[in-house]
């Protein structure tokens, strides 16, 4: 071939390969491979639309043969069909012959994640940090889950979620396939959430950094009430990080996790109606909300305990409970809590009692007495009942702490006290003073106990002060805010890593 023709051919070949590079970059990630070979694999229909019409089909075919040689030196990315093609870009099925490498990269603020790697006929693997896996060739499915992080010194953890939770990858014989999972902070996490029945009927949150020392604070997120949604009270988070809040007329509002990163005047995303249990009595807000290990929502409302199955939580409107528990001991429910064994504990305010329903009883309707009924007395010399329990929380050792609203006292029931009904005098009783009402109590990651204090404030009792009884004049940390008004409920998102609370962790 004359030199000037050879130069022309090389120039056209360079243009052709450059076009292949650009086309591969525009192709979907799951169908892309690196290098000029992308043209052969990512877009087999390229010849039909090739702009270089001046090339003869013979010359074009020759150029393709040059650009589409052995590609063993070029690792493929997620979903690229390897030597067998496949993925979103088309081509032959992913070949399951030989061995290759699957590179799983986790990009997260704490460099950790949770990725399940599965493929038919191949043992499942779990990846929690970036890793290279030597695997048989074939098609793989990778599913990433949210992870919680609890750094030292923080009072509430962080939850990180994958931006793209499910990806597929084809591992080819002798090739390396790369898959990347990018994690982001889940909206609504690393916060203390509260409800306040002030003029604004507020549901709000404080960032974790605001909890470290006393002072004036402002909510980082706030949702106002409305004429239709008033007296918002009990708080719970489901496993996905959605926020559930009870309201005055037998309503339960839902704000989805993606809306929890900033303040809004928008209405809740969903509103469930359980007002049938109110029997026409208003106000009738659920005093307690809690999720069980299966994602079912338990609602304590007046003299009913209701279970709403996870499958029935996706919409709005009236919902039919799958389980209803009643009984003479259930009267004015003010709090619910599950222990580590799945037993349900209930604050029955008008009975001055804390009730326990064993896990095996929670699958069917019932009206039989509770399995355990606990009542508490003040110590000598003035012995009397601790009255109107309104807050429940388990500590790291499994002890149950109860806030008694009328008595302005928080009492500790040791794990050994929880196995049988009794009227007893808890050894640890904390008097919080007439200006602090233990309407709700919640433990942070460090084991400090938080409660509503006087109007416009919240306080934390230091873990060291929880060892012995006595009056607590002021918390180790006191936060004040005009937004608080009269605080009703407190909830950490995520709950402590040792807590039996079901939620995003």
Image (tube, rainbow, N blue to C red):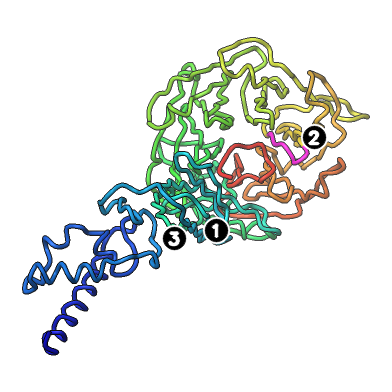
Answer with mark 2 or mark 3, whichever residue precedes in sequence.
3
Residue located beneath label 2 in the image: 412
From mark 3 to mark 1, how far is it between C-alphas? 12 Å
| Marks 2, 1: nearer the viewer | 1
Please give the name of the residue rendered at 17% of the width and 82% of the height, measured from the top-left corner: 11
Residue located beneath label 3 in the image: 176
Looking at the picture, does residue 67 appear above or below residue 122? below
Looking at the picture, does residue 39 appear above or below residue 281? below
Q: Of the numbered discs in the image, which one, if any, rests on residue 131?
A: 1
From mark 2 to mark 1, how far is it between C-alphas? 46 Å
Looking at the picture, does residue 116 appear above or below residue 302? below
Answer with mark 3 or mark 1, whichever residue precedes in sequence.
1
**Quadrant assignment, res 237:** top right
Asked if labels 1 and 2 touch by Cβ distance under 8 angstroms, the answer is no
Neighbor class of circle 3 (other Cα within 10 Å; few <14, some 14-19, many 20+) is many
Q: Can residue 65 be seen?
A: yes
Residue 426 screen position, x and y as percent: 85, 31
Q: Is mark 2 on a helix, strand or loop?
A: strand
**Quadrant assignment, res 209:** bottom right
Please give the name of the residue rendered at 19% of the width and 73% of the height, measured from the top-left corner: 16
Residue 345 screen position, x and y as percent: 67, 26
Q: Is mark 1 on a helix, strand or loop?
A: strand
Is residue 448 shown left or right of residue 90? right
């Amino acid at each position: 071939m004359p030199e000037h023709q050879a130069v022309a051919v090389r120039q056209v070949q360079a243009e052709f390969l450059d076009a292949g590079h650009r086309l591969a970059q525009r192709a979907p990630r799951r169908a892309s491979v690196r290098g000029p070979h992308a043209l052969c694999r990512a877009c087999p229909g390229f010849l039909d639309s090739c702009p270089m019409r001046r090339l003869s089909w013979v010359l074009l075919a020759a150029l393709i043969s040059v650009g589409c040689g052995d590609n063993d030196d070029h690792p493929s990315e997620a979903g690229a069909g390897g030597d067998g093609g496949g993925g979103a870009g088309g081509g032959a099925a992913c070949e399951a012959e030989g061995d290759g490498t699957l590179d799983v990269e986790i990009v997260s603020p704490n460099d950790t994640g949770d990725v399940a790697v599965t493929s038919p006929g191949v043992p499942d693997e779990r990846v929690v940090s970036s890793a290279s896996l030597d695997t048989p060739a074939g098609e793989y499915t990778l599913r990433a889950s949210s992870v919680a992080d609890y750094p030292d010194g923080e009072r509430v953890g962080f939850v990180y979620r994958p931006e793209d939770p499910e990806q597929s990858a084809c591992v080819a014989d002798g090739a390396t396939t790369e898959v990347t999972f990018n994690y982001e902070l889940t909206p609504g996490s690393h916060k203390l959430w509260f409800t306040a029945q002030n003029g604004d009927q507020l549901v709000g949150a404080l960032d974790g950094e605001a909890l470290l020392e006393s002072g004036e604070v402002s909510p980082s997120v706030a949702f106002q009430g409305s004429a239709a949604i008033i007296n918002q009270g009990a708080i719970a988070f489901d496993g996905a990080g959605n926020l559930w809040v009870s309201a005055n007329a037998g309503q339960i509002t839902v704000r989805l996790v993606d809306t929890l990163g900033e303040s809004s005047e928008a209405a809740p995303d969903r509103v469930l109606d359980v007002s049938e249990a109110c029997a026409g009595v208003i106000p009738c807000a659920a005093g307690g909300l809690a999720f069980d290990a299966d994602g079912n929502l338990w609602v304590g409302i007046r003299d009913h305990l209701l279970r709403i199955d996870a499958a029935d939580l996706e919409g709005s409107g009236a919902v039919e409970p799958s389980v209803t528990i009643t009984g003479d001991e259930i009267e004015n429910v003010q709090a619910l809590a599950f222990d580590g064994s799945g037993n349900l504990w209930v604050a029955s305010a008008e009975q001055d009692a804390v009730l326990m329903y064993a896990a095996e009883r929670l699958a069917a309707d019932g009206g039989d007495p509770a399995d355990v009924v606990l009542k508490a007395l003040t110590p000598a010399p003035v012995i009397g009942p601790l009255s109107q329990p309104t807050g429940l929380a388990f500590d790291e050792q499994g002890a149950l702490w109860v806030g008694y609203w009328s008595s302005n006292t928080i009492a500790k029931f040791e794990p050994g006290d929880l196995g049988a009904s009794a009227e007893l005098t808890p050894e640890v009783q904390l008097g919080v003073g007439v200006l602090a009402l233990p309407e709700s109590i919640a433990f942070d990651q460090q084991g400090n106990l938080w409660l509503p204090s006087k109007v416009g404030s919240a306080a934390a009792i230091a873990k060291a002060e929880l060892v012995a009884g006595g009056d607590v004049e002021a918390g180790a940390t006191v936060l004040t805010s005009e937004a608080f008004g009269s605080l009703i409920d407190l909830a950490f998102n995520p709950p402590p890593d040792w807590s039996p609370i079901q939620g995003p962790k």
